[in-house]
Image (cartoon, grey):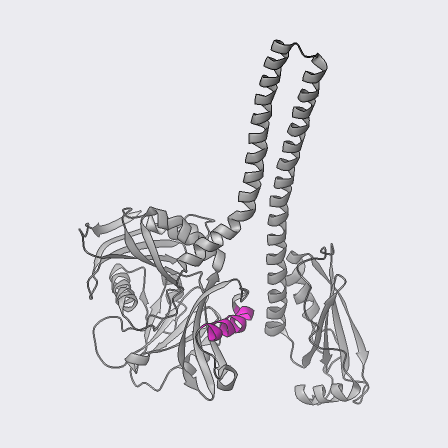
C-alpha cells in the first residue's frame, strides 16, 4: 500500500471517494468545504478474485476507520447510454421512467429490471430520440456493499462508474471536450455548454476499431483539440493521441478533486446509484426470514430437548420417591429419543433448503446469462446476406431460423456453439430448405439447433418467448428484398 499524505479533519464534515479501477484501489479523503481539497490519499493493488463489495471494502480499509460520507467510483458498474424514441417515453417520469429504463437496459447490462439498483440522468434530445445515461448494479450487490462498510464508519451515499466526469480537468475556461478510455468503454464528454454537459457511452473497448466514428458523432463541432484521459498507460497507447493517465499522481489528484466537487454539488448531472438504506434493511429482514424461521425451529427443538431432559430427571426423582415401575421410565426415554430423531431431521431439511436455494439462484443466473449471450452473438456475428427470422425454445432445444441468399454454411452455428458450450448447450449442424423464389432455388431457409446436453428441470425459467414463427413464401420474398440480392451465388463462407 502507498500512502501519499493525510491528517485528521477534527469536527468538520468528512467525505471520501473510494475508487476501483482494474487492479487498483484508491481512497481519497476530503474536508467538508464547498471547494473540497484532498486531505488523505492512499493507493493499493486490488485483492485477486474479490467481488465488487469486497473491493470497495478493501479501498475503505486503506485509511482510518472514522465516520465519513462515501461515494464509490467502481469500474465494474454497468454504465450505458440509451437512445429511445421520444414518443415511447411520453408521460413517464419518476419511478415509472426509471422502471422503463431498467427494462430497456436489461439487454445490455444483463441485469433484470426487478433486480437492478440504478441511477440515471437525461442526456439531451437529438433527431427525435431521448438520450439517457444509466448506471446499474444488482440490488443484492449494493445491499452487500452497504452491509460490509457501514459498520466500519462509512455512510454510503452513492455508487457510480468512474467515467464521464462532466467537468474540465486542469485550468481554463469556456467549452471543452474529452475522450475517456476505460477497459470496457469509451466515454465521450462534450462540455461546450458546461451547464448541460453531454455524455455518450461507446460500449466497446479502445482496442476495438470503429469506436472513433461513433465517438465523433457524439461531439458538437469544436475547433480546439479534444483532451484524452486514459485509465491506464496501456489504454493510452491505444488512443488517438497524447493522453493524460490516471497512473500519474497529479492527473489523479485533479480528477479526484473534479469528482469531489461534482458529487458535492446540488445538480444531478451523473447517474449515481443511491442505496435505499431502509429498503436494504427491509430486504435483509426478508432474506433473513427463512433462516430466522429455521433457527426458531431449531431453538424450539433444542428447548424441547432440554425440557425433555429435565422431564427425564423429574421422572427419575419421582420413580425413586414413589418406586414407579421401570417400564414408565423406559417410555419417557423412548419419547426423548424420538424427539432427537425429529431434531436431526429438521437440521437435514434446513441444510437441504439452503442447498436448493443456492442451486436455483445459480440456475436462474445461468439462464439469464445464456439468453443474453445468445442475443449478443446473434447481434455481433450475423453473417452478411443472412436475416434472422425466428428464435424459439422448448423441450431442451433452441432453434434459430433465418433466410440466407447462399446455400453454403455461414459459420453462425459454430460461433453460437462455442459461445453456448459453457452453458451446457451443443450446436447441431444446420438444416436448409430451398424456398425456390430465385433462379438456382434460392433463397434458403436455414435453421440452427442448440440442444441441452442435460435438459434443465422445469421450474422458474420458462425459456425464451417465441419471437417469430416459420416464414411463409411471401414473407420469405420480403426478407430477400430486405437483405439484398447478389449478382450471382459466390458460395458463401464457412
Q: Is residue 345 left or right of residue 241?
A: right
Left or right: 129, with 253 as reference point? right
In front here: 218 or 354? 354
Q: In the figure, 285 relative to 90: above or below?
A: above
Looking at the image, is 12 positioned above or below residue 104?
above
Q: Judge by depth and name the residue closer to the eye, 106 or 436.
A: 106
Q: Is residue 491 visible?
A: no
* Camera-side residue of 358 and 249: 358
Q: Quadrant of residue 426?
A: bottom right
Give the image location of residue 35, x and y in percent. Answer: 20, 66
Give the overall secondary structure of the magenta segment: helix
Where is residue 354? Give x, y as percent: 60, 44
The magenta segment: 95-108
* 434 relative position to 365: left or right: right
Can residue 97 be found in the magenta stretch?
Answer: yes
363 or 43, which lies in front? 363
Q: Quick one: which residue is furthest to the front in this view?
A: 322
Give the image location of residue 306, x and y in percent: 56, 26
The total number of labels drawn is 0
Query: Which residue shows up at 69% across the image and 22% down it?
Result: 334
Q: Position of residue 160 (x, y in %)?
A: 39, 64
What is the quadrant of the C terminus in the image?
bottom right
Task: State whether residue 390 is above or below residue 486.
Answer: above
Amino acid at each position: 500500500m502507498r500512502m501519499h499524505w493525510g491528517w485528521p479533519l477534527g469536527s468538520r464534515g468528512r467525505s471520501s471517494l473510494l475508487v476501483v479501477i482494474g487492479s487498483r484501489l484508491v481512497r481519497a479523503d476530503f474536508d467538508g468545504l464547498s471547494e473540497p481539497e484532498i486531505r488523505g490519499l492512499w493507493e493499493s493493488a486490488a485483492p485477486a478474485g474479490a467481488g465488487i463489495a469486497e473491493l470497495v471494502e478493501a479501498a475503505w480499509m486503506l485509511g482510518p476507520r472514522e465516520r465519513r460520507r462515501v461515494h464509490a467510483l467502481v469500474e465494474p458498474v454497468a454504465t450505458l447510454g440509451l437512445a429511445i424514441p421520444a414518443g415511447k417515453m411520453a408521460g413517464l417520469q419518476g419511478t415509472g421512467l426509471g422502471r422503463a429504463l431498467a427494462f430497456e437496459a436489461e439487454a445490455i447490462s444483463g441485469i433484470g429490471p426487478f433486480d437492478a439498483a440504478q441511477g440515471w440522468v437525461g442526456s439531451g434530445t437529438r433527431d427525435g430520440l431521448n438520450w439517457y445515461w444509466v448506471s446499474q448494479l444488482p440490488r443484492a450487490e449494493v445491499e452487500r456493499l452497504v452491509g460490509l462498510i457501514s459498520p466500519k464508519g462509512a455512510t454510503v451515499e452513492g455508487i457510480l462508474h468512474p467515467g464521464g466526469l462532466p467537468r474540465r480537468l486542469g485550468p481554463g475556461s469556456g467549452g471543452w471536450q474529452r475522450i475517456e478510455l476505460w477497459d470496457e468503454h469509451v466515454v465521450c464528454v462534450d462540455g461546450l455548454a458546461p451547464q448541460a454537459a453531454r455524455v455518450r457511452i461507446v460500449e466497446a473497448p479502445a482496442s476495438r476499431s470503429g469506436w472513433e466514428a461513433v465517438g465523433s458523432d457524439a461531439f458538437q463541432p469544436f475547433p480546439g483539440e479534444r483532451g484524452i484521459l486514459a485509465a491506464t498507460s496501456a489504454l493510452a497507447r491505444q488512443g488517438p493521441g497524447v493522453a493524460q493517465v490516471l497512473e500519474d499522481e497529479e492527473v489523479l489528484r485533479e480528477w479526484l478533486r473534479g469528482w469531489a466537487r461534482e458529487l458535492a454539488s446540488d445538480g444531478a448531472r451523473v447517474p449515481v446509484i443511491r442505496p435505499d438504506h431502509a429498503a436494504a434493511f427491509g430486504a435483509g429482514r426478508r432474506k433473513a426470514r427463512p433462516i430466522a424461521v429455521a433457527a426458531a425451529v431449531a431453538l424450539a427443538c433444542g428447548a424441547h430437548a432440554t425440557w425433555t431432559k429435565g422431564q427425564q430427571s423429574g421422572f427419575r426423582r419421582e420413580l425413586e420417591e414413589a418406586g414407579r415401575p421401570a417400564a414408565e421410565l423406559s417410555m419417557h426415554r423412548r419419547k426423548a429419543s424420538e424427539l432427537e430423531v425429529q431434531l436431526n431431521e429438521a437440521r437435514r431439511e434446513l441444510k437441504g433448503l439452503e442447498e436448493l436455494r443456492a442451486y436455483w439462484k445459480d440456475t436462474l443466473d445461468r439462464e439469464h446469462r445464456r439468453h443474453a449471450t445468445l442475443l449478443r452473438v446473434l447481434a455481433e456475428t450475423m453473417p452478411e446476406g443472412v436475416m434472422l427470422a425466428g428464435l424459439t425454445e422448448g423441450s431442451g432445444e433452441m432453434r434459430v431460423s433465418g433466410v440466407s441468399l447462399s446455400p453454403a454454411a455461414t459459420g453462425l452455428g459454430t460461433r453460437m456453439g462455442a459461445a453456448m458450450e459453457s452453458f451446457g448447450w451443443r450446436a447441431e449442424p444446420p438444416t436448409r430448405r430451398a424456398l425456390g423464389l430465385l433462379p438456382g432455388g434460392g433463397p434458403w431457409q436455414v435453421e440452427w439447433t442448440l440442444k441441452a446436453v442435460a435438459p434443465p428441470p422445469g421450474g422458474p425459467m420458462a425459456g425464451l418467448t417465441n419471437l417469430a414463427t416459420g416464414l411463409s413464401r411471401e414473407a420469405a420474398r420480403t426478407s430477400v428484398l430486405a437483405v439484398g440480392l447478389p449478382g450471382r451465388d459466390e458460395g458463401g463462407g464457412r
